Amino acid sequence: MPAQSSLPLYVQIAELLIRDIAAGRYLDGERFPPERELAERLSTTVTTLRKSLMILEEKGLLKRIHGSGNYVQTQADVDSVYAFFRVELLAGGGLPTAQLLSVSREVKPDVLPEFGRSDEGYRIRRLRSLSGVPCVLEEIWLDASYAPSLSAEMLSDSLYLFYRERLGLWITRAEDRLSVAPCPTWSPDGFAPEHGAPLCYAERISWAQDGVPAEVSRNWIDTNKARYIARIK
């Protein structure tokens, strides 16, 4: 069953299926299990599942054949809530959820690439899980010019969705830089690697609709449970 999230359950299930298709857990042309069986597998109702499948159909990922069933149609670039989230479970896919650890307004540290118009940024620290498995530590820096204030109550699991709906900020492209870095000392008990342990590290610069870099994020990935994935088609 999908983990707790601020998204409606049918959207969570649709996002999980979208990520599973992208990961190759469902192949192009493959028939989905019967709806009742798939609903039981996902611990939901057939009514909720059908709403999820409608989303997949609208995105061109599912073809319904009357009297036969629902068939997968893979697509290269699918617009989804977590389209920019590049980490998957080792087995593939996994629904992303986030546990907020802290949010504060700070002067931007010198270690960050230059971004935005303000000397300050909102530092958001989170523990990201995939289908309930803690996998990634995140430290997101949003340029302070985009919001007069930012609180824990305002944020949602998908920050990019929050940016669009609440701040009028659209992330149109991003650049990821991969390396190795030690697990930070602020990691919570739920994150398995020890402080200082070498982890896969992804630093991302994200650009807004006006072409200005608006956000920098730092991500430490537990490679015993997940991996960074970039698909090129």
Image (cartoon, helix red, strand yellow):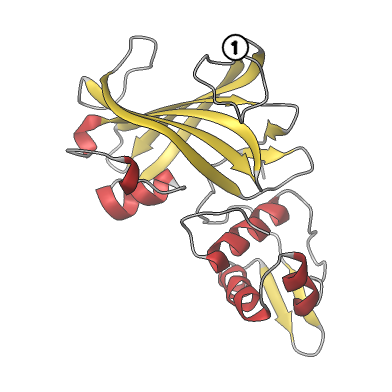
Q: Tell me where residue 171 sits by quadrant.
A: top left
Q: Residues within 10 Å of mark 1 (few under 14, many from 20)?
A: some
- For residue 112, say whether it is visible: yes
In the image, taking residue 191 as reference, residue 224 lies left or right, namely right
- For residue 168, say whether it is visible: no
Amino acid identity at mark 1: Pro
How many numbered marks are there? Answer: 1
Q: Quadrant of the N terminus?
A: bottom right
Q: Give me the residue at 48% from left, 59% from top.
A: 7
Q: Give me the residue at 58% from left, 53% from top.
A: 77
Please provide percent x and percent y for residue 58. Answer: 56, 72
Q: Secondary structure at mark 1?
A: strand
Please provide percent x and percent y for residue 132. Answer: 65, 45
Please determine whether, in this image, residue 64 is positioned above or below residue 16. below
For mark 1, what is the residue?
Answer: 182
Q: What is the residue that sits farthest to the left in this orientation?
A: 148
